[in-house]
């Protein structure tokens, strides 16, 4: 506090820009999930769509459509598939177009080698 | 403020500031629109006043918005201020799934704001996540007010809100357009 005050007196500027430095509390924030493309087959995608309570996940023919805007970061998909779905750690998600928030995650080919 | 200049007070429509398609003047109009956008951005780059609009939210978003004025986040250092009057506001921060009973109040609030104005849809409800359209809610802000910036999160943390506000006034670039939310890199390293 004293250092901050003296620095402000010396420079004449007491405020900082955003973000001045990474915020410690940001690590604890719930964040939208990241999907591992190699684990994502049709059965898993259907299970994730069924478990999502906020209509953030949708199945297309060959992709899982993830609407980041609709995601509440509740973590149910991570619970349903712990290895395949992890937390992204991204919370600065503001978008200038609604379409930027809709992500298509390609499903794995069904042919199992 | 050059308030006498008519070009900085464009008439907003629900479709945003996009010029009409086609026609011989389309390119000229697009150039004009881009110039206008830059001038508006420079206007918003100064001190900016925010009016919040709760359209049926659970108040978690309001809790986070309230925290913006706390010393840790200190919204005022960036030149943002909250105002109780829409007539003094440059930016409308809309939370909640836009309940239909609030239509007239939302429209009045939007109309009362002087142009140019920004609408920021805040939280998963306002973005169309939690509630689907039914007899009581529109389900998202988009159909009622022309949103310019979308801030996801349930609720968005104060840091996310700060980032969203700075994106809204063109002081920070948005990050989410470049994110894929699929970890393809690890799949490549897996050697399978």
Image: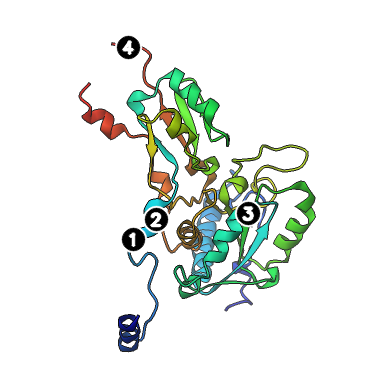
Lower sequence index among marks 1 and 4: 1
| Mark 3 → mark 2, Cα distance in angstroms | 22 Å
| Mark 3 → mark 4, Cα distance in angstroms | 46 Å
| Mark 1 → mark 4, Cα distance in angstroms | 43 Å
Pointers 3 and 2 in contact (CB under 8 A)?
no
Of the residues tagged 3 and 2, which is closer to the observer?
Answer: 2
What residue did someone put label 2 on?
A26
Discs 3 and 4 lie in a common subunit: no
What residue did someone put label 4 on?
A112
Of the residues tagged 4 and 2, which is closer to the observer?
Answer: 2
Closer to us: B41 or A50: A50
User: In percent of the image, x 74 and y 37: which residue is there?
Assistant: B134
Discs 1 and 4 lie in a common subunit: yes
What residue did someone put label 3 on?
B95
Discs 3 and 1 lie in a common subunit: no
Residue B25 visible, this angle: no
Q: Quadrant of residue B128?
A: top right
Closer to us: A77 or A9: A77
> SS class of the residue under badge 2?
helix
Q: Tell me, for residue A22, which label it has, or none.
A: 1
| Mark 4 → mark 2, Cα distance in angstroms | 40 Å
> SS class of the residue under badge 3?
strand
In which chain is the residue bearing label 1? Answer: A
Q: Is residue A90 above or below residue A79?
A: below
Badge 4: residue crowd in 10 Å (few <14, some 14–19, many ≥20): few
Q: Is residue A55 above or below residue B61?
A: above
In which chain is the residue bearing label 4? Answer: A
Residue A29 visible, this angle: yes
Q: Is residue B179 above or below residue B90?
A: above
């Amino acid at each position: 506090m004293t250092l901050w005050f003296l620095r402000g007196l010396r420079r004449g500027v007491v405020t900082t820009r955003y973000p001045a430095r990474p915020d410690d509390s940001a690590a604890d924030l719930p964040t939208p999930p990241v999907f591992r493309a190699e684990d994502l087959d049709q059965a898993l995608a259907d299970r994730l769509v069924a478990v999502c309570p906020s209509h953030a996940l949708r199945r297309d023919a060959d992709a899982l459509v993830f609407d980041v805007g609709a995601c509440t970061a509740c973590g149910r998909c991570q619970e349903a598939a712990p290895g395949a779905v992890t937390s992204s750690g991204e919370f600065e998600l503001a978008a200038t177009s609604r379409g930027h928030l809709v992500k298509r995650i390609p499903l794995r080919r069904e042919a199992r080698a | 403020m050059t308030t006498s200049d008519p070009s900085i007070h464009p008439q907003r429509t629900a479709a945003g500031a996009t010029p009409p398609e086609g026609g011989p003047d389309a390119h000229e109009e697009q150039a004009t629109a881009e110039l206008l956008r830059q001038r508006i951005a420079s206007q918003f780059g100064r001190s900016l006043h925010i009016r919040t609009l709760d359209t049926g939210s659970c108040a978690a978003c309001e809790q986070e918005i309230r925290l913006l004025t706390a010393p840790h986040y200190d919204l005022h250092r960036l030149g943002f201020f909250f105002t109780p009057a829409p007539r003094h506001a440059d930016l409308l921060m809309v939370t909640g799934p836009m309940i239909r009973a609030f239509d007239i109040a939302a429209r009045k609030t939007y109309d009362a704001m002087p142009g140019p104005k920004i609408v920021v849809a805040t939280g998963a409800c306002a973005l169309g996540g939690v509630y689907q359209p039914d007899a009581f809610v529109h389900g998202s802000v988009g159909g009622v007010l022309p949103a310019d910036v979308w801030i996801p999160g349930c609720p968005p943390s104060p840091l996310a809100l700060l980032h969203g506000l700075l994106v809204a006034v063109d002081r920070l670039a948005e990050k989410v357009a470049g994110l894929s939310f699929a970890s393809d890199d690890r799949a490549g390293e897996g050697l399978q």
